[in-house]
Image (spheres, rainbow, N blue to C red):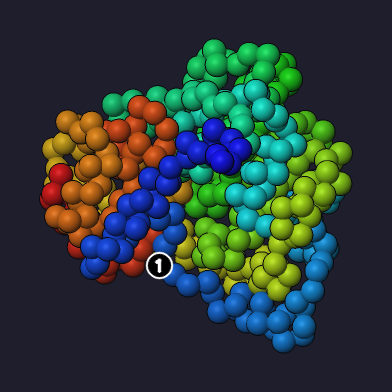
Amino acid sequence: MKAPIRPEIRQMGLNPIGEIAQLAWKVGGVTPLQYGEGDLATPEFIREAAKHALDEGKTFYTYTNGIPELRAALKTYTDRLYDVDIASERISVPGSAMLAITVTLQCLTQTGDNIIIVSPIWTNIILAAAAAGVAVRFAPLTKDESGRWHFDLEAVAAKCDARTKAIFIASPGNPTGWVMRRAEQENLLAFAREQGVALIADEVYARLIYDSDVAPSFLEIAEDEDPVFVINSFSKNWAMTGWRIGWVTAPKSLFIPLQTLSGIANTGATTFAQYGALAALTDPRGESFIEMMRERCRRGRALVEKAALQSNRVKPMRIEGAFYAYVEIDGISDSKALAKRLMTEAKVAVAPGSAFGPGNDNFIRLCFATDEKILAPALDRLFSAL
């Protein structure tokens, strides 16, 4: 007898980036630039805080929206970073940032609804919508001849209808490195208010920006009860990808529903891991690590720009934030095939552009948050092979 599995689930394939990763393991000897992480381990002081919590027996169930100390530290961090006064009840720590996105979609949507995704976008966002039974409509950024990406509010508006419940936007962008300007945020927020739709803003890379300390945030312009959900994470700033700790800043009135949804999903974030996250925020070495990470990525970005000059097929790119190069290549129409060829010929794994939404098959994405001694030769091999 055929199991009653939803069609959306049956139709799901393997994440294209995961497919490349599995192939890289089989090939062996491949420099892994396909992932959204660098090669630094979590700083020792953060690891020690989690170990101390374990030694103190902090291994029991705890608050499903985050331990009070961590939520208080997140409020302090947010207020200082953006010069705001965020109500503590707006901050929830359900687990990973991906789980924060999942519970946000549960708050906003039901089967038959749709969301607008400003693309190119990280592939898991597309899959999360599909898993929720929600249709996705893409509103692409546009790229000019200098390599800079631009937001198009008219493209977003053209995709909206009566069943549109949310607009998803990431700035700084993964994979593009694009950073949304304040005026663009203000215009989009005004449009969302007028249309009665929510904004889901992925601001995970807000500290990894190259011309200031932090990217513009919707938290600086949204009111407490605006339907704005700002997603953030410890993964990138503090090299904590394996910890699965993120947070969402949401309308104050949804504090209890988000607490309940987190309880349903995983009974809350891992208790002792939250004390490591607390140390990242409260120990002065946390800010020092972010500054070091930004400078490391700045050097990686320069290596990408230098290596790209080897190929006359690579179009100009402007990387304003995050730690990715989204490389547009003339004459390419199958980014997955190209990624597989580069793996065997250049011994470098990259993410195919097709993973980031339709119309991106002439792109590949690579992460440059890697030690220069490893990154530089890998980039030389990669761009020489294009």
**Residue 42: percent from left, percent from top:** 53, 71
**Residue 189: percent from left, percent from top:** 67, 25
Looking at the rendered structure, the kind of residue marked 1 is: Asp
Q: Nearer the viewer, residue 36 or 323?
A: 36
Q: Is residue 164 left or right of residue 358?
A: right
Q: Is residue 164 left or right of residue 302?
A: right
Q: Secondary structure at mark 1?
A: loop
- Dividing the picture into quadrants, the one containing residue 162 is top right
Q: Nearer the viewer, residue 347 or 148?
A: 347
- Determine the residue located farthest toward the front in the rendered image: 1
The residue at the point 46 percent across, 49 percent down is 322
Q: Is residue 58 above or below residue 378?
A: below
The residue at the point 67 percent across, 78 percent down is 49
Give neighbour class at mark 1: few <14, some 14-19, many 20+ (Cα, 10 Å).
few
- Dividing the picture into quadrants, the one containing residue 376 is bottom left
Q: Is residue 85 above or below residue 47?
A: above
